[in-house]
Image (cartoon, rainbow, N blue to C red):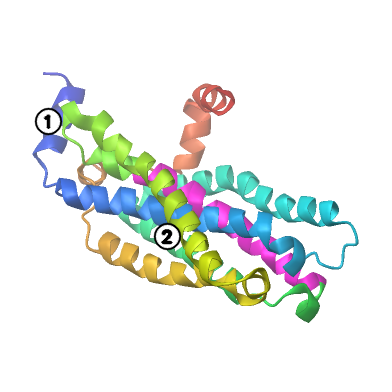
């Protein structure tokens, strides 16, 4: 038996979370993160042009400026993957998943509390951009971490199935976010939504984040990472190791 096969056998023998726990920790957490992400997208298209860019005389310019803040998160997501991937390989998947959920949750809640342009001026827009950037970092760390939790807890012949759990979180978050806005808009007119209604999905996110944290705090560390700890194979600088030994694969995967 090779060393790789022996290590795989030990990982299989270690205690792992149940299927329900893995689904809850990966899929539910990812759904919450994407709920936050999509809630911003809906608000950026429908309400932020008036709330934060209402001083612009041209409505099209206001809309484009608002959507530009939406794009900020896509710049931050690769950075979030690097940061949380680095610390996930040092400290464990469980810790980084909890922190990524908190990162996204706090940024989303703060957006819901943010004063408008009329109250704070350009400072409101600056803080909005900062919160959006932090959202991107949180989601970048969440998606990669959730995929690791799912696949590293999977039996050897079910890794693809378990790896699909985090991917289901994105459409679930989409429906939750748009469903929330649909209900709000069904019972409130445009003026009410612009005045305060757009804040409700961001503030409601705090409840979902608490639920996600409860699930993740009670989950076990993945058996693969625990095995690496037992064999003292956890490196001090995982990010350096990746770019030193696997930089070609990183570039290939990025551009693919």
The location of residue 2, given as percent across then percent down, is: 16, 19
Residue range in magenta is: 122-146
Image point (19%, 30%), residue name? 158
Judged left or right of residue 191, residue 244 is left
Quarter location, residue 101: bottom left
Q: Count the marks: how many? A: 2
Image point (57%, 52%), residue name? 136
Give SS at disc 2: helix
Q: Does the stretch in magenta take in 144?
A: yes
The location of residue 29, given as percent across then percent down, is: 36, 55
Give the labeled residue for mark 1: 9
Q: Is residue 233 visible?
A: no
The location of residue 239, given as percent across then percent down, is: 49, 41
Q: Is residue 37 visible?
A: yes
The location of residue 57, given as percent across then percent down, is: 91, 62
Give the labeled residue for mark 2: 101
Which secondary structure class fits the magenta region best?
helix
Instruction: Point out the residue furthest to the bottom here.
Output: 119
Image point (20%, 44%), residue name? 223
Reply above or below: 54 against 71.
below
Judged left or right of residue 1, residue 148 is right
Q: Residues within 10 Å of mark 1 (few under 14, many from 20)?
A: few
Reply above or below: 245 against 118.
above
First along the sequence among labels 2 and 1: 1
Give SS at disc 1: helix
Judged left or right of residue 51, residue 171 is left
């Amino acid at each position: 038996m090779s060393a790789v096969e022996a290590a795989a056998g030990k990982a299989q023998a270690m205690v792992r979370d149940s299927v329900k726990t893995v689904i809850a920790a990966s899929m539910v957490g990812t759904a919450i993160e994407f709920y936050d992400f999509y809630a911003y997208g809906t608000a950026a298209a429908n309400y932020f042009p008036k709330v934060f860019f209402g001083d612009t005389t041209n409505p099209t310019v206001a809309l484009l400026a608002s959507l530009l803040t939406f794009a900020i998160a896509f710049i931050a997501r690769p950075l979030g993957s690097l940061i949380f991937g680095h610390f996930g390989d040092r400290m464990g998947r469980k810790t980084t998943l909890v922190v990524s959920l908190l990162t996204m949750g706090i940024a989303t809640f703060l957006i819901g509390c943010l004063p408008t342009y009329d109250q704070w001026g350009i400072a409101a827009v600056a803080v909005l951009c900062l919160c959006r950037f932090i959202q991107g970092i949180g989601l970048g760390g969440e998606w990669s971490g959730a995929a690791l939790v799912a696949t590293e807890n999977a039996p050897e012949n079910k890794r693809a199935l378990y790896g699909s759990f985090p991917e289901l979180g994105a459409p679930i978050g989409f429906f939750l976010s748009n469903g929330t806005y649909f209900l709000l808009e069904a019972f409130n007119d445009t003026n009410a939504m612009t005045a305060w209604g757009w804040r409700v999905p961001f503030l409601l996110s705090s409840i979902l984040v608490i639920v996600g944290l409860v699930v993740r705090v009670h989950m076990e560390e993945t058996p693969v990472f625990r095995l690496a700890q037992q064999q003292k194979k956890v490196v001090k600088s995982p990010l350096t190791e990746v770019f030193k030994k696997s930089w070609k694969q990183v570039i290939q995967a990025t551009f693919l």
